[in-house]
Amino acid sequence: MDAATQSMIDNLPQNTGRNLTDWFTVLEATGLDKHTVLMNQLKTEHGVSHGFANFIVLQFRARGVSQTADALVDAQYIGAKAALRPVYDALIDAVTEFGSDVEVAPKKSSVSLRRQKQFALIEPASAKRLQLGINLADAPPTDRLLLAGGMCTHKVSVTRRAEVDDELLGWLHAAYEGN
């Protein structure tokens, strides 16, 4: 469990009057199952803030679902996206060679690559390509390295293992070094 999630769980009693287990009991008793409906129940019937209501419902609905790092990654590369797993594995193998301080942090639909902060993000964007976000603040865009918005300054589409080449690894290494 990441530190932010644990912090939210630890702060529930102080901010909402109940711990997570107690909130699960409350939600279970409603017989409801839709995210928004459950959130509205917590907000209107129990005065829980939007942020905590969303967190409680996300945790409630994720019960029994494996949240291990391996399970999160495995779930991203099933079905039509399974063919992209070797590309993902090649990226991870290469990036973890940058240093022992590389953190691979899987989420439900992406994997963050961090050092002191995130330097790249891998997302299986479709059945045909990975979207690799890279934080390279001063790098000029190219035909392959495109400008992006959001948490990553640039993005690269990767469709096959051969595209995990020296050029791509150079950009990733520069992002790692700049972190």
Image (spheres, rainbow, N blue to C red):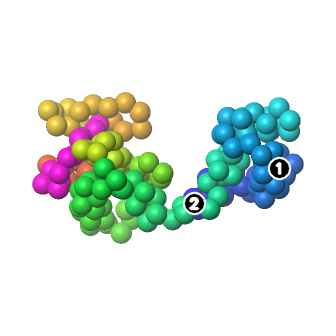
Residue at (61, 54) in percent of width and height: 62
User: What is the distance, in whole Å, between disc 2 and disc 1 at their CAs?
Assistant: 20 Å
Would you say residue 160 sits in the magenta stretch? yes
Q: In the displayed structure, would residue 92 be above or below residue 174?
A: below
At label 1, the amino acid type is Ala
Image coordinates of residue 9 in percent, x first then y, are 72, 55
- The residue that mark 2 highlights is 65
Q: Is residue 10 visible?
A: yes
Query: Mark 1 or mark 2, which is nearer the start of the sequence?
Result: 1
Image coordinates of residue 71 in percent, x first then y, are 46, 63
At label 2, the amino acid type is Val
- The residue that mark 1 highlights is 29
Region rendered in magenta:
154-165
In the rendered structure, are the residues bearing label 2 and label 1 in contact, judged by CB atoms less than 8 Å apart? no
Residue at (20, 32) in percent of width and height: 141
Q: Is residue 174 left or right of residue 10?
A: left
Residue at (54, 61) in percent of width and height: 67
Q: Which one is in front, 13 or 82?
A: 82
Dividing the picture into quadrants, the one containing residue 73 is bottom left
Dividing the picture into quadrants, the one containing residue 45 is top right
Image coordinates of residue 34 in percent, x first then y, are 66, 39
Image coordinates of residue 81 in percent, x first then y, are 31, 51
Nearer to us: label 2 or label 1: 1
Q: Is residue 140 left or right of residue 105?
A: left
Q: Residues within 10 Å of mark 2 (few under 14, many from 20)?
A: few
Label 2, secondary structure: give it: loop
Q: Is residue 169 left or right of residue 65?
A: left
Residue 119's label in the rendered image is: none
Would you say residue 73 sits in the magenta stretch? no
Q: Residues within 10 Å of mark 1 (few under 14, many from 20)?
A: few
